[in-house]
Image: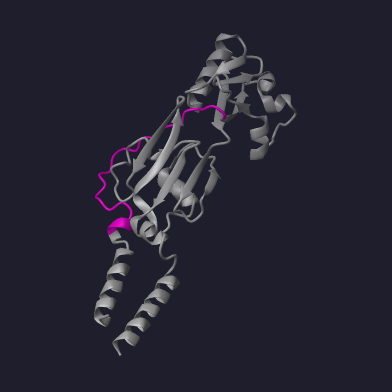
Amino acid sequence: MNQHFLVFVIAIFLLQSCASNKDIVYFQDNYAFEALEHHDALIMVNDILKIEVSAVIPEIAIPYNIFSASGAVGATSVDALKLQGYLVTANGDITFPVLGVINVRGMTTRDVEAHIVELLGTGGHIKDAVVRARIVNAKITILGEVNLPGTYNFTEQNITLPQALGYAGDLTINGRRHDVMVIRQQDGEREIGHIDMTKTDWFNSKYYYVQQNDVIVVHPNNPKVKSAGFVGSTVTILSIVSILLSTAILITR
């Protein structure tokens, strides 16, 4: 066996296992800045809502506040909010004090606020009420080639896909940036989006902001896939190279 030929073969193998800059650098194209559009998340089944009603005379609003009615005024723990919040049923309903069953499926939190204000006013309950609503159990799941895969809770009204990936410690060097998958359930249907993180043409798409219950999947890139069944680490590669070179030297003596 020719020693130079063996070195050439090893070099080709190592080059095939490497990723270029175009495979790992984010947002490589020139982004044309446009006005940022916020997309409020739609309320879904199993969401838990915190809804507060206030009025000019605070005592009037007490019967319409679940925390006040249960004696939990001032509770700020997220776990407490989840246990005593309004759970959206499979039909998209919540059971609200005094007002009864209200269907909120497909609404945003702003829609819920406006709807309850209307019900309180037209029903003769509270005039000029102020209603605040938010989702308290929003979560996303991030899987695959990220440093910290798992399920993450968030309390912000809107978070972006790059922020979500930041929760998971960013993609590993082996993550496939050209095709990050977003699995989303909405209106009883499941849809899948494919995002190229090396570009910016998706910044104005519906996947720029993640929604509660989104599942984000980062697949391994080609070098990772090629090496998965053969070598598992740099140490292994160096060991194989060392053995092959030693064998070549012994054969060619």
* Front-most of residues 104 and 253: 253
Residue 30 in the figure: left or right of residue 108:
left
Q: In which quadrant will I find the C terminus?
A: bottom left
Taking the image as shown, residue 32 lies to the left or right of residue 224, namely: left
- Residue 103 percent coordinates (x, y): 54, 18
> Residue shown at 31%/51% (left/top)?
198
Please name the residue shown 43% across and 57% down the image.
172
Colouring scheme, one of rainbow, by chain, secondary structure, one colour: one colour
Residue extending furthest right?
71
Q: Nearer the viewer, residue 53 or 57?
A: 53
Q: Is residue 202 visible?
A: yes
- Count the labels in the image: 0
Q: In the image, residue 2 lies at what x, y percent?
A: 25, 81
Give the residue displayed 41% in from the left and 60% down from the top.
229
Which range of residues does the magenta coloring cover? 22-46
Coordinates of residue 42 in the picture (x, y in percent): 47, 28
**Residue in the picture at 42% in, 54% down:** 171
Report the side of 136 relative to 199 (left or right): right
Q: Quadrant of the N terminus?
A: bottom left
Q: Quadrant of residue 184?
A: top left
Please check the rendered image and state whether residue 29 is part of the magenta-colored stretch, yes or no. Answer: yes
In this rendering, the answer to whether 245 lies above or below 125 is: below
Q: Is 1 on the left or on the right of 88, as rendered?
A: left
108 in the magenta segment: no
Say which quarter of the image contains residue 64: top right
Q: Quadrant of residue 10?
A: bottom left
Q: Is 139 drawn above or below residue 45 in the view shown?
A: below
Q: Residue furthest top?
A: 123
Q: Is residue 185 above or below residue 12?
A: above
* Camera-side residue of 50 and 122: 50
